[in-house]
Image: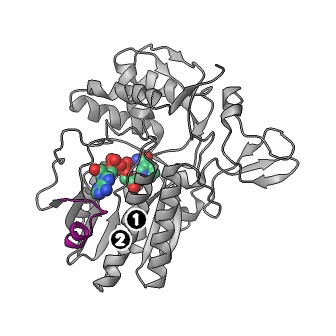
Amino acid sequence: MRVLVTGGAGFIGGHLADRFHKEGFEVRVLDNLDPKVHPSGEPPQFPQGVEFIRGDVTDREAFRYALRDVDVVSHQAAYQDYMPDFSRFLAVNAVGTALLYELIVEDRMKIRKVIVASSQAVYGEGQYVCQEHGPFLPIPRSARQLQRKEWEVSCAQCGQRATASLLIEQHTNPYNQYAVSKLAQEKTALGLGWIHGIPTVALRYSITQGPRQSLFNHYSGICRIFVSRALIGDPLIIYEDGLQTRDFVHIEDIVNANMLVLEQDAANAQAFNVGSGHPTSVIDYARLVREKVGNQVEFLTPGEYRTGDNRHSVSSISKLQALGWSPKRSLSQILDDFLVWVQRNGGIPEQVQDAYLNMKQAGVVLSAGH
Ligand SMILES: NC(=O)c1ccc[n+]([C@@H]2O[C@H](COP(=O)([O-])OP(=O)(O)OC[C@H]3O[C@@H](n4cnc5c(N)ncnc54)[C@H](O)[C@@H]3O)[C@@H](O)[C@H]2O)c1
């Protein structure tokens, strides 16, 4: 059995490539070594026998070459960032996925399963309930609202503060370029997979963390940014008021979810959330980092926010739990495992600090109340 892992030089794809290799698959990786993720231009070390192809998922010939004699496709490659090069998100994430299906159909490949990495980002600002007007899908908080430091989501009809619900798979509502591209990717895969009889599953990962996550990628930065600042005693800069909540899942739990849906036909043609099921506020995350690093760093809440960010994002995991998966590792374990890995690799490189400055310069991080 041969598996193609696109994005297999990256964080999640790398762990998946290792696991497929351990399970006895012949593993091939297609990855363009995006310089934002791999500034050295070098691929990581793969286990012996893993075949690495440097190539782009938007390049027809490279993708076709990588798909030779493949039984399973684990499609992890994606462009992820907060930067304003909007068209690139759709070109890589949506068009690249359409190309995958185009090649499978054109070359009449017998693919047993395609698993597509989707994202919790497809929910946009989330799913809320107003006490008076019931459930609703909010539009993103406006720049005016954020400038006034009114961080919470309110009901569009009565203006009362609304309560965030756990995100369920039925209701997607993306707005930013990454979120739109991930939903387009997922719809392309599930739709074309269904029509052309290519068993396909989309997994909407929550924020995934653990050893080997890119130290350079601007996206999903809380772990490496807080840890890197705490290690050198710099204050932790917290966006908004720190009470926004997120859902953090350990990389091993993500790998196990992939293995489960690979085997289960009942998962085909559907999207599933893969998260922890628990909210963690950013301030609690910062406290845990401080405790783990053992450094009395200060917390700063200068009233900054990131354009396109949402307030609360915690996925319901009951749909995947019904198929037999459950997350087994806590946030505390995520941080322990990440810190061991960072220390084993000689600490966090200096360039990592630049992500925050880059985002400020690009107007992605803004200050409220000016
Ligand atoms: N890490 C998270 O928290 C998270 C959360 C939700 C969804 N996801 C999704 O999971 C997948 C993997 O994310 P990750 O965290 O491992 O990211 P990552 O940046 O560590 O890895 C992505 C890999 O894809 C490669 N890549 C980028 N563009 C490519 C292209 N055009 N052609 C070929 N390769 C390309 C990069 O070089 C990199 O090695 C992505 O699809 C992402 O959208 C990740």
Q: Which residues are magenta?
A: 54-66
Q: Look at mark 2 in the image and give the residue it sits on.
A: 99
Mark 2 Cβ and ligand 1 under 8 Å apart: no
Residue type at mark 1: give it: Val
Q: Which residue is depicted at the point 18% across and 47% down?
A: 44
**Residue under label 1:** 95
**Quadrant location of the N terminus in the rendered image:** bottom left
At horizontal 63% and vertical 39% (from top left) the residue drawn is 311
What residue is at 28 percent from the left and 24 percent from the top? 350
Kind of residue at disc 2: Leu
Q: Is residue 249 visible?
A: yes
Q: Residue 155: percent from the left, percent from the top? A: 80, 44
Q: Is residue 61 above or below residue 218?
A: below
The Cα atoms of the two marked residues, 2 and 1, are separated by 6 Å
Q: Are marks 2 and 1 in contact (CB under 8 Å)?
A: yes
Q: Quadrant of the C terminus?
A: top right
Relative depth, front residue between 148 and 48: 148
Q: Look at 57% across and 40% down and name the residue there.
A: 309
Q: Viewed as shown, does residue 111 lie left or right of 48? A: right
